[in-house]
Amino acid sequence: MGRTSKDKRDVYYRLAKENGWRARSAFKLLQLDEEFQLFQGVTRAVDLCAAPGSWSQVLSQKIGGQESGHVVAVDLQAMAPLPGVLQIQGDITQLSTAKEIIQHFEGCPADLVVCDGAPDVTGLHDVDEYMQAQLLLAALNIATHVLKPGGCFVAKIFRGRDVTLLYSQLRVFFPSVLCAKPRSSRNSSIEAFAVCRGYDPPEGFTADLTKPLLGHSYDSDVNQLDGPTRIIVPFVTCGDLSSYDSDRSYPVDEACTLKKSGRLAKEIHPQDCPIRRVDTLPQPLATPQPHTLLAPEMEDNEMNCSP
């Protein structure tokens, strides 16, 4: 599927092409890690709904490069191989997939589970928000099978009218739940990321993919969370304010001229940071530039950057 002119103008799309990432969404995980240190102490990580593989690329460089690091990527469709990443072509709603993940970890649970998956959007926000919530809960359900106590779970959400119910469901399993918006995620997109830390399932909980995630034995508190007692989680923006603005158009010729003169971004040598070379603006541009705002839309996060 061809990219639109808007996609080609997007600075993170061009940076992804320049740095060899499969999709611009790689910068979202990098910025989430900068804010929350997601990879600290992590040796086993699972990437759900992984295709085309940009988050798996980040995990392979941050975790898979370690001698003891293991990364497992799961998706219904096959994707090109990645060094340090073991791929499972399977359904995250199936118990066999969870067993295969644990098998690859030699019986040990994962330290980190991430999910950047999203359904094909319809443009009907209520429908899209519901479908995304169900996808997140499916990812959470398999995470209850493979995540260690105290582990971290990160997944994409669509912020909408009923998102507080989703937060309350996440709070059943995690004492710390935050809503994070990376700078590389467009402001015109309703997407954000739930960052859940300290996995601690309720007493008596038994993971079971064949049943609904929340059972009657421990969801009574959730059902009462409305009005002033509803769950409100902190909202955090990730990424340096001086970094690139994903909602701004940087003309290619102008950006190249500014970059050559050292006025667009600070150059970082590959040996200093193998993950990315350019992503911060040391100072504002010398002259004000016109801003081009995108119309409100669902963000096509998995923008394949392969030629």
Image: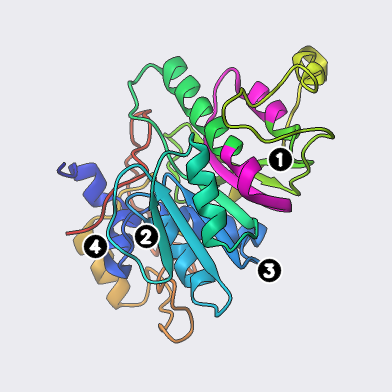
Name which residue lies at 49% across and 20% down: 130
Could you give the CA–CA distance between mark 3 and mark 4, rounded to whole angstroms?
42 Å
Q: Which residue is mark 3?
A: 41
Question: Which-is-in-front pick, marks 3 and 4?
Answer: 3
Amino acid at dot 2: Thr
Could you give the CA–CA distance between mark 3 and mark 1, rounded to whole angstroms?
20 Å
Q: Is residue 143 magenta?
A: yes
Could you give the CA–CA distance between mark 3 and mark 2, rounded to whole angstroms?
43 Å
Question: Is 100 situated above or below 206?
Answer: below
As helix, strand or loop, the secondary structure at mark 2 comes to: loop
Badge 4: residue crowd in 10 Å (few <14, some 14–19, many ≥20): few
Question: Which-is-in-front pick, marks 1 and 2?
Answer: 1
Amino acid at dot 1: Val
As helix, strand or loop, the secondary structure at mark 3 comes to: loop
As helix, strand or loop, the secondary structure at mark 4 comes to: helix
Seen from the viewer's position, the closer of residues 143 and 278 is 143
Question: Which-is-in-front pick, marks 3 and 2?
Answer: 3
| Residue 240 visible at all | no
Q: Which residue is mark 4?
A: 254
Q: Return the x and y of residue 165 as percentages of the image width and height.
A: 66, 21
Q: Which residue is mark 1?
A: 177
Quarter of the rendering occupied by the C terminus: bottom left
Seen from the viewer's position, the closer of residues 297 and 137 is 137
Name which residue lies at 60% across and 43% down: 143
Q: Which residue is mark 2?
A: 287
Tell me which corner region of the image, top left, top right, bottom left or bottom right, holds residue 67: bottom right
Q: Return the x and y of residue 173 as percentages of the image width and height.
A: 74, 37
Magenta residues span 142-169
Question: Is 265 situated above or below 142?
Answer: below
- From the viewer's perspective, tell me whether residue 82 is left or right of residue 136: left
- From the viewer's perspective, tell me whether residue 84 is left or right of residue 179: left
Mark 4 or mark 1: which comes first in sequence?
Answer: 1
